[in-house]
Image: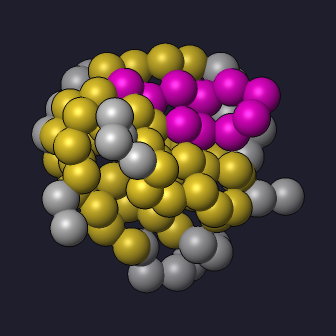
């Protein structure tokens, strides 16, 4: 079963997709999120979000600046201050 992932900024919805895994650049370190991950919320540092569409796939990389990441019943939502690209 896939992980529902959304990446948003104050200005727009950047991405909404079902994926295999997302690696988040948290302030406490990188965190890999798969479907069924325990709920949590973390602040993010400037860095790269890596999105794996399928198991073993080459990740898509999106640079972000600051924000928050939250895992809940609806999947993973990243609220980034800014997205590059």
Picture residue at 77% right of the left edge, 28% below the top: 73
Residue 1 is left or right of residue 67, and the answer is right
Identify the image quadrant of the C terminus.
Answer: bottom left
Q: How is the image coloured?
A: secondary structure
> Residue 48 appears in which quarter of the rendering?
bottom left
Decide: is 54 above or below 22: below
Q: Residue furthest front?
A: 11
What's the magenta bit mostly, secondary-structure-wise?
strand
Identify the image quadrant of the N terminus.
Answer: bottom right
Q: Is residue 75 visible?
A: yes
> Residue 56 appears in which quarter of the rendering?
bottom right
Residue 78 is left or right of residue 11, and the answer is right
Residue 6 is left or right of residue 25, and the answer is right
Q: Is residue 31 visible?
A: no
Pinpoint residue 59: horizontal percent, then vertical percent: 41, 73
Picture residue at 55% right of the left edge, 48% below the top: 6
Residue 62 is left or right of residue 15, and the answer is left
Picture residue at 40% right of the left edge, 33% below the top: 79
Q: Nearer the viewer, residue 60 or 6?
A: 6
Decide: is 70 above or below 20: above
Picture residue at 52% right of the left edge, 81% below the top: 57
Q: Nearer the viewer, residue 66 or 23?
A: 66
Magenta residue span: 68-77
Pinpoint residue 80: horizontal percent, then vertical percent: 31, 37
């Amino acid at each position: 079963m896939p992980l529902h992932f959304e990446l948003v900024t104050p200005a727009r919805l950047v991405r909404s997709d079902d994926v295999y895994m997302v690696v988040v650049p948290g302030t406490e370190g990188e965190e890999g999120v798969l479907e069924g991950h325990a709920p949590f919320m973390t602040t993010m540092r400037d860095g790269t979000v890596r999105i794996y569409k399928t198991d073993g796939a080459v990740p898509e990389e999106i640079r972000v600046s600051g924000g928050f990441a939250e895992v809940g019943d609806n999947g993973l939502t990243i609220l980034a201050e800014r997205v590059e690209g």
